[in-house]
Image (cartoon, helix red, strand yellow):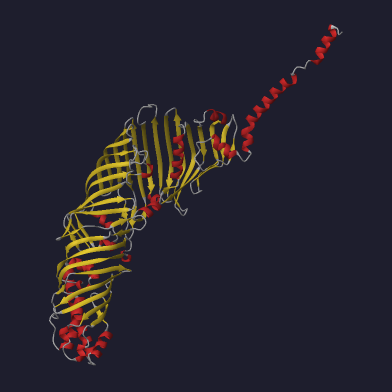
Amino acid sequence: MATAEQVTESSVDEAPSPPRRRRRRWPIVLLLLAAAVYAAPWFLSINGVAEQVTATALPWLPPGSNIGKPSLGWMSPVHLAGLKILDDDGRVLLECDHVTSQKSLWEMAASPNSPGGWVLEKPKAYLHVDPKGLNLNPVIRKFLARKRRAAPLNFDLTIEKGTIEFVDPDDRRLSTITDVSARYANSAKSRTFEATGDLNDGQTKGAIDLRGQWDDSQNEAPLPTATVTGNVSYVPLTLFRPWLAENSTVEEISGGGELTLSASSEPAAVLGKVAFKPRDALYRRHGEARAQPVPTSGLELNAQWDGANDRLTFHSFHATTGLVNLKGVGHIEQPRGAGIVELRTTADQDVTGMLDLLNPQIREHIVVKGLRVRNVAVTGALWPDDFVAKSPGEQPPPPATFAGDITWTDAVLYGVRATPGAVTAAFQPHGVALWPREVRVGDGQLVTLPEIQLVDHRQLVAPKGPMLVDVNITPEICREWLKFISPVVADATAVEGKMTLILESGQLPLSNPQAGEISGIVRLHSANVTPGPLAQQAIDSAAALARLITQKQPAGAEQGLQIELPPQDIAFRMQDGRVHHKGLRFHAGDLVVMTRGSVGLDHSLDMLVEIPMPEAWLDRGPVLRSLQGEVFTIALQGTLDRPQVDGRAIAEWGKRLGANAAGGLLQNLLEKGIDRAAEKAQRRRERRDAP
């Protein structure tokens, strides 16, 4: 039997030893873990995951940021060496060798929506200007979209000795802003910013000074209390050259001027003013020989914000630019989204001087007196893709259109004289659409006008259908354009009749009108014309042939006789600088004459005159009766003023008539007629052009 002492010893030997060593290991593990956490930023800085970790820790950086090699420490400021922000095309938008935070990484991790202050030393920004704007715009949109999904950021930003370069699509420098100094300070809900720099286009230097502040402390207010002022002593307009080249008729722009702006807002009101005062600014449109001065421009507005209905209402709106002076009222719905504009202004401004901006080849055919613009309106969505429907089934609005009424006291366009009337002009994204409003042309009417395309191809595009209806034919219309379609009216001194112009298609480049392509029909209701050289040539050709056949002067061959154009459709097509026609028919006494061929815009001829053999000429024996149903055809070359006859066709007809000398006789008769007609036409032009 075991003794008590033995039991005690056995119990002591079998009991487990106390976990002294394990308790000693826990402090070591905790120390190692703390050291690892403390040193983690340093380890991550030398590993390839540094960029991903930094982007996760700093989610407010714009997308496309290249962090470079960050220097991270929990208790020390963050330093980013080699920061690069790329645009959507992979080009460098911003690069900076030294970016330093004022807060430590631990402080930023503890409050991720308050990254504190950041200093960018000698950053360089590269802004590419292209037909769509700046490459900065898509980056800003993405950043703002991310910001809307996250909580507002509270941070400060300082830029020291920065540089901004503006380059065109070919990477040629347009302008540079040097010595950029900027500061954005965020104190609670009150914010301030200021920026200065020197803008230089290689010739002229301008100073930049921008300042502003706003207060968001009144959470219930629709708008913050804010003020913004700015002045750029010289803005080089070459900055806008790539955009203007693709979105306007401006071909060249130079010089610049002073830009000033000021804006302020209260909880429910907005005031703004922008003004541009040119110094040596000039611009030249396509086809112009001389440059024009850029006009002084300005914009003033007084608006009220309705946050409940998401509407900005303009109590007053005043815009001036050159010859245009607009005043009006209106509103913008969804101003932070689709920007649905309803703005109506009144104007009574003489804009006759704007006609001098037209291509000289077009300008010489247009005479307008008392040209004025009135009743201008802007309607539609500025950004249709951002439309948000307020109710199910609500249709998105159309793109914004700028429209106005244009009136005149007297107008002559390519010989078409229009009585006082009005045209509505709508400035759309691709160009300008024009709609006549009860425009009378003599006893007829102007029913359509071509559209002016300004984006892809700068040209006039005529709509399909009638353009002029029941219009009186005048010597001016004949002289300006009808002579190319109906050459027999060329240089007509007197004309009576009516016509309708129907177009099938039409494109007329603004820079090179002779390269236009137009097709359609001239519908003559009837016309009587005192013939010019070409019509007289056709009559003389028929008369000379008749004298050989009938041995007498045919009726209708005498000089000064009016010719008759019966009702008919004349199809025409303008292409490669020539106007082709067919089916033109006219009567001169008992003679019927037809023409087909082309007339160049340089007045050159390539035509055929066709004279069917009248029955009355052929009742003179079997030789002449054999010509029944045939057509006497003569080729005309030369010009409208002095047509030239192809003698080979005449000689061939002389042989068929059995008279060896007939070809030469007919040729002499025709040449005499040409000379007489050309001399008369020259005298008429001299009288017409005499002062």
Q: Taking 426 as reference, is 226 left or right?
A: right
Q: Taking 250 as reference, is 108 left or right?
A: right
Counting the numbered discs, the total is 0
In the rendering, at what x and y percent does residue 273 appear?
A: 31, 39
> Which residue is the extreme one toward the right?
1
Question: Residue 4 falls in which quadrant of the image?
Answer: top right
Task: Report whether residue 378 is seen.
Answer: yes
Question: Residue 474 falls in which quadrant of the image?
Answer: bottom left
What residue appears at the point 27 percent right and 85 percent down from the top-left corner? Answer: 649
In the rendering, at what x and y percent does residue 18 appear?
A: 75, 17
Q: Taking 10 as reference, is 81 left or right?
A: left
Q: Is residue 457 above or below residue 199?
A: below
Question: Residue 332 falls in which quadrant of the image?
Answer: top left
Q: Is residue 350 above or below residue 193?
A: below
In the rendering, at what x and y percent does residue 473 appear?
A: 17, 66
Q: Is residue 148 above or below residue 529?
A: above
The quarter of the rendered structure image containing the C terminus is bottom left
> Which residue is the extreme one toward the top?
4
The quarter of the rendered structure image containing the N terminus is top right
**Residue sitting nearer the eye, 207 or 296:** 296
In the rendering, at what x and y percent does residue 124 appear?
A: 50, 44
